[in-house]
Image: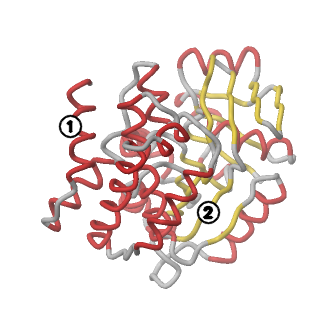
Amino acid sequence: MRFLVIGAGGIGCYYGARLQLQGHQVAYLARGEHLQALQNNGLSIHHPQLDFNQPVDALDIDQLQSRFQCQDFDLILLTLKAGATASILTQLADWLNTAETPVLSLQNGVDNEPVIEQALGRQRTLGGLAVRIGGHIIAPGKIEATGPAQIVMGSWPNQSSEQIFPAATLATFAAAFNEAGIPSQLSDDIRYELWRKLIINNGVNPLSALTRLDTQALTSHPTFGKTVYRMMQEVAKVSAADDVTLSQADVDEMFELICNFDAIKTSMLVDKEKGRPLELGGISGAVIQRAAQLKVEVPNTELVHALLLQQE
């Protein structure tokens, strides 16, 4: 198959490398020093179960549009920060609208798929989660990753909706991922799964950036661990704004999952350390927005969000 990875960071490069090793054609959209390193020296990935050092087809946005047509790809993987989703879809609008290639979002938050749907239509929109993976650029062209690196994906917003991407074709993508060593499964209700992931992201991402602690240190701390749990509960309180019901069992399951996962630096903590903009809007911002819509209180999320904004 032919894949395009838009956003060649830690997550996108790891999945792209797995697919490339399986014999699939993969193109990586990147920029800056990272792009130059990929083009000149190839991609290097270190993962407990994978050491990858190979040339890759890395492109900037102009090279992508001059060398390829959208129809040249079977699937586009969107692995950018959530705040960049609307911008890249606008930049590539004319190119994307020449074909019916589906776009799979593997991003944080619950607002990316609606943006893709608005730009390309529901039938081309696939929701997805990168589960139990930590991946970061440690130097231009060099990635460090950890975790089982699973994918959960589904037609947006759920299998019972009208005008969705065909389930049979989606299953072929999942099969290709599994064969490439990317444990993947299909969901009949991907919007629910995205909200379950937001439980974890809202619980640990902002607080880790504020405290500079990894997930294990954060969840095991006698005070911060309680705050993580409360911020997770606040996600469940506001999920009804998107017609999703999250139970106490969902919160408990996600809390147990992150407590028992490898100690990792969250993406927001890495951004904080590198002086990059934080993905607040797609995570804690999404919770606060829906809390205002429903007129419910989310004090822990609001406090951590406000403190980070003040630091920014």
Q: Amino acid at mark 1?
A: Ala
| Along the viewing direction, whichever of 182 and 228 lies nearer the viewer | 228
In the picture provided, is 231 more to the left or to the right than 172?
A: left
Query: How many residues crowd around disc 1 within 10 Å: few (fewer than 14), some, or many (20 or more)?
Result: some
Q: Which mark is residue 306?
A: 1
Q: Which residue is tagged 2?
A: 152
**Extreme-front residue of the structure:** 222
Q: Which mark is residue 70?
A: none
Q: Is 250 rendered above or below residue 202?
A: below
Query: How many residues crowd around disc 2 within 10 Å: few (fewer than 14), some, or many (20 or more)?
Result: some
Where is the C terminus found, in terms of image quarters? top left
Residue at left offset 41%, top offset 53%: 109
| Along the viewing direction, whichever of 138 and 126 lies nearer the viewer | 138
In the picture provided, is 79 more to the left or to the right than 94?
A: right
User: Residue 219: image x %, image y %?
Assistant: 48, 45
Q: Amino acid at mark 2?
A: Val
| Along the viewing direction, whichever of 174 and 139 lies nearer the viewer | 139
Mark 2 / mark 1, whichever is N-terminal:
2
Residue at left offset 69%, top offset 48%: 3
CB contact under 8 Å: marks 2 and 1: no
User: Residue 311: image x %, image y %?
Assistant: 25, 24
User: Marks 2 and 1, Cα distance to the nearest angstrom?
Assistant: 32 Å
**Extreme-bottom residue of the structure:** 160
User: Residue 296: image x %, image y %?
Assistant: 16, 64
| Along the viewing direction, whichever of 124 and 18 lies nearer the viewer | 18
Tag 1, which secondary structure? helix
Residue at left offset 45%, top offset 82%: 162
Q: Is 265 rendered above or below residue 5?
A: above
